[in-house]
């Protein structure tokens, strides 16, 4: 009975999941691209193109040397063909002759691109309460509301600008949370990163706007290596959002980013991502290889860092937004929805490192696998002997759609302290034919039924997202699943 | 639709699942305003019968036909059958985590509205509609914010089914063992809800094991099913006889 009805539902659900990617277009624009390949000269060339200070060039060269000695990590539950790092261009930027005074001077072709993505950078149509830094291939093409933010001392700019305007902060904090040699991709990024966002929230300041970076990979042969650094001083608060898309190519593009967050005493950083890189076609061709290192340091007492991610794109996702809970009473949170379909593979999760006394962390992870995809949660909760009274709660739920998808959970718990309280809950379920039939019998069509089931499954996470993002995320999941339930 | 045609007519229906024939030459005719009770030993095909009418994809109809309001519904999807007015109260209502009862009920209601080109209702307007129905089954409004059937007691689940039946105002309601697992009070509430709902333009099929439900809801006919077909049909008296003599008596 189960087989037969599964077949029917599977066909319906497959139709439902396989909706085309609406951001798959590419922009034709004059570019400044450097030759493919990575050598010490490449690193020097990037640094020179960006007119960087000496300390940064040294940072890059050190990273490059480290990277040369390192090996691709093999422990993740991912299978893909080897990446040829010499076949990638490490710098691609839209050509512009002069320095722009304001955003309205940006190449209209670029503005149109972002307009098409639903991101408006021009004065009139900006989102009222969100400041946006738009990154196109290797460089930031503009940041909105910069002046308004400056009035309250908040710095929000591309990291390249920050290198020139705030070299001391960059030198002090860059690589302080994710060391150069942390992993293979962090070393690579440290050597060749081209742009990204920089935020600095001064003491006693609650950032009046949500800050947002929108990443767009356009070029077929270049990788994207961006770097984000957010520093929240004592008693400050900031909400940060990140979105990303890429055109549809039948080759794989590499994306290896680093995000570093630093929360000082009593500061709060909330970082939300909706990741929708191109995920490849239904046969598994093309798509972005997404290898990202995201880590936050709760440096001060009662500081708090909260990661929320909705991962729906990329053919390969390798990503573990983590918190180092150094300060006493500090708090780390990780809320994640990872959806994979067709031949997508995701190995994602978090690390919570408890060092401070009474530090607390909370992990809620929801994985949805459809098609022939593989979706793994990998997490580490580590409590050191100093972290008296540390607490952690983890919950990992997986939802399977169809009969060919794969879900895994790899939780690691490492405790060196008898005063610790740790809870871990996990569940795996399948959208069952009886659930679907219940909806259908009540007159609710399959699409709606799946939509409701999925958003019900993810509800806990969506409530953590900023309002505009929550609606987008909900829509995105439905879109991604169009045609795949069973 | 022919006014004189029965609401539901099943003709020589043969149904199988995984090559197992469950219904064999099944015949049944139900007119508007009638309540039919179907009784029979476990495994006689009662639940299969209810799911086949609702269009469950697991069952395949080998031969025969099902007419609803005079037209065959064999080619219709489950949701279309629902829109036409067929309702199935499940024996084991399934839990749907993360989906609130209110959202679920509104979506079901609006799906039907949409089907009949009637305006869909917003959340506030819906509250006034559902509030009145809740009273009919003695449920508190707090029940709307809970997830569909999640953590419901057996009685609450069954009441929720009856609530949905009333909300969707279906013409043919099949209640699959709605009385099982209920205490006397809950049984009375549910029976009351059903009796208030029933009118001359509707029909109800009660699938039950127990005569006690029929003390509250009086059936027009009682059928006994065995081995995939109806082997005896009678009045309410038949149920009483069965209660004292058991199914063996019919063999």
Image: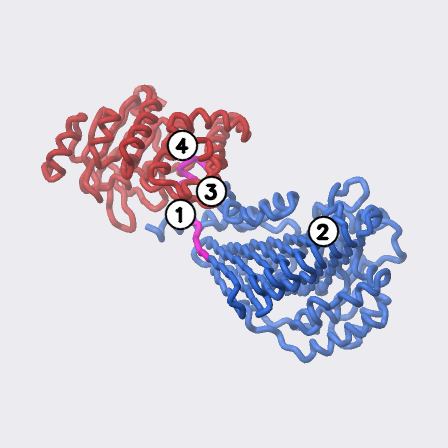
Chain colours: A blue, B red
On whether disc 2 and disc 1 are found on a single subunit, the reply is yes
Residue picked out by circle 4 = B164
Count residues near mark 1 (Cα–Cα under 10 Å), then give few for <14, some for 14-19, many for 20+: many
What x and y, as percent, mark residue A105? 86, 49
Count residues near mark 3 (Cα–Cα under 10 Å), then give few for <14, some for 14-19, many for 20+: many
Q: Give the distance between the C-alpha atoms of the residues marked 2 and 1, in whole angstroms.
A: 43 Å
Residue picked out by circle 1 = A433
Of marks 3 and 2, the one in the foreground: 2
Quick one: quadrant of the C terminus of chain B? top left
Of marks 2 and 4, the one in the foreground: 2
**Considering the numbered disc 4 on the image, is that residue within a helix, a strand or a loop?**
helix
Of marks 2 and 1, the one in the foreground: 2
Q: Earlier in the sequence, mark 3 or mark 2?
A: 2
**Res. A138 mark:** none
Does the segment drawn in magenta span residue A431? yes
Q: Give the distance between the C-alpha atoms of the residues marked 1 and 3, in whole angstroms.
A: 11 Å
Q: Residue A283 lies in what quarter of the image?
A: bottom right
Q: Which residues are drawn in magenta?
A: A426-447
Does the segment drawn in magenta span residue B9? no
Q: Residue A428 lies in what quarter of the image?
A: bottom left
Kindly identify which chain the residue marked by label 4 belongs to.
B
Q: Give the distance between the C-alpha atoms of the residues marked 4 and 3, in whole angstroms.
A: 19 Å
Q: Is residue B103 shown left or right of residue A206? A: left
On whether disc 4 and disc 3 are found on a single subunit, the reply is no
Residue picked out by circle 2 = A238
Of marks 4 and 3, the one in the foreground: 4
């Amino acid at each position: 009975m189960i087989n037969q009805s599964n077949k029917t539902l599977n066909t319906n659900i497959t139709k439902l999941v396989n909706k085309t990617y609406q951001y798959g277009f590419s922009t034709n624009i004059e570019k400044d691209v450097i030759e493919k390949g990575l050598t010490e000269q490449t690193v020097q060339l990037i640094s020179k193109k960006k007119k960087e200070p000496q300390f940064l060039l040294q940072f890059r060269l050190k990273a490059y040397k480290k990277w040369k000695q390192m090996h691709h990590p093999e422990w993740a539950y991912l299978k893909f063909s080897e990446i040829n790092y010499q076949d990638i261009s490490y710098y691609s930027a839209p050509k512009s002759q002069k320095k722009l005074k304001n955003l309205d001077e940006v190449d209209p072709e670029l503005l149109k691109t972002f307009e098409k993505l639903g991101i408006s950078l021009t004065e009139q149509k900006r989102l009222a309460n969100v400041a946006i830094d738009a990154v196109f291939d290797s460089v930031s093409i503009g940041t909105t509301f910069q002046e308004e933010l400056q009035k309250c001392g908040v710095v929000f700019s591309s990291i390249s600008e920050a290198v020139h305007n705030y070299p001391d902060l960059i030198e002090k904090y860059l690589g302080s949370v994710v060391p150069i040699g942390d992993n293979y991709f962090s070393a690579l990024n440290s050597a060749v990163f081209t742009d990204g966002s920089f935020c600095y929230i001064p003491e006693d300041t609650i950032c009046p706007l949500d800050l947002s970076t929108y990443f767009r990979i356009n070029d077929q042969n270049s990788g994207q290596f961006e770097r984000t650094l957010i520093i929240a001083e004592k008693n400050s608060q900031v909400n940060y959002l990140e979105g990303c898309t890429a055109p549809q190519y039948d080759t794989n593009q590499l994306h290896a980013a680093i995000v570093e967050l630093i929360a000082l005493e009593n500061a709060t950083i909330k970082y939300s991502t909706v990741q929708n890189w191109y995920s490849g076609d239904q046969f598994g061709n093309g798509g972005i290889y997404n290898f990202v290192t995201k880590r936050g340091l709760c440096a001060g007492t009662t500081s708090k860092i909260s990661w929320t991610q909705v991962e729906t794109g990329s053919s390969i996702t390798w990503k573990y937004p983590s918190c180092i809970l150094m300060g006493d009473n500090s708090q780390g949170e990780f809320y994640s929805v990872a959806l994979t379909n067709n031949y997508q593979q995701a190995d994602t999760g978090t690390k919570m490192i408890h060092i401070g006394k009474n530090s607390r962390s909370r992990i809620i992870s929801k994985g949805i696998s459809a098609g022939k995809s593989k979706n793994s949660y990998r997490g580490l909760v580590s409590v050191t002997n100093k972290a008296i009274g540390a607490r952690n709660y983890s919950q990992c739920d997986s939802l399977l759609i169809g009969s060919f998808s794969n879900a895994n959970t790899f939780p690691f718990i490492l405790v060196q302290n008898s005063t610790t309280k740790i809870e871990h809950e996990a569940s795996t379920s399948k959208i069952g034919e009886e659930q679907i039939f219940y909806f259908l019998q009540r007159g609710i069509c399959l699409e709606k039924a799946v939509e409701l089931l999925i958003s019900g499954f993810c509800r806990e996470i969506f409530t953590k997202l900023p309002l505009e993002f929550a609606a987008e995320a909900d829509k995105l999941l439905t879109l991604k699943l169009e045609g795949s339930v069973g | 639709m022919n006014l004189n045609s029965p609401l539901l007519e099943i003709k020589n229906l043969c149904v199988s699942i995984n090559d197992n024939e469950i219904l064999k030459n099944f015949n049944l005719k139900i007119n508007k305003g009638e309540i039919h009770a179907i009784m029979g030993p476990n495994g006689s095909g009662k639940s299969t019968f209810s799911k086949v009418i609702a269009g469950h994809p697991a069952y395949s109809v080998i031969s025969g036909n099902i007419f609803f309001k005079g037209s065959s519904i064999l080619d219709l999807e489950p949701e279309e059958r629902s829109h036409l007015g067929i309702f199935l109260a499940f024996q084991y209502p399934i839990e749907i985590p993360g989906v609130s009862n209110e959202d679920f009920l509104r979506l079901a209601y609006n799906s039907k509205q949409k089907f009949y080109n009637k305006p869909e209702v917003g959340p506030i307007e819906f509250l006034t509609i559902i509030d009145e129905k809740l009273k009919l089954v003695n449920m508190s409004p707090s029940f709307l914010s809970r997830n569909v059937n999640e953590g419901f007691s057996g009685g609450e689940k069954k009441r929720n089914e009856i609530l949905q039946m009333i909300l969707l105002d279906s013409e043919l309601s099949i209640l699959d063992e709605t009385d099982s697992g209920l205490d006397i009070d809950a049984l009375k509430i549910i029976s009351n809800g059903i009796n208030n709902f029933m009118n001359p333009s509707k029909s109800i099929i009660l699938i039950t094991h127990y005569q006690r439900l029929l003390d509250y809801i009086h059936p027009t006919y009682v059928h006994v099913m065995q081995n995939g077909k109806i082997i005896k049909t009678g009045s309410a008296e038949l149920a009483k006889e069965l209660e004292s003599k058991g199914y063996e008596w019919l063999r």
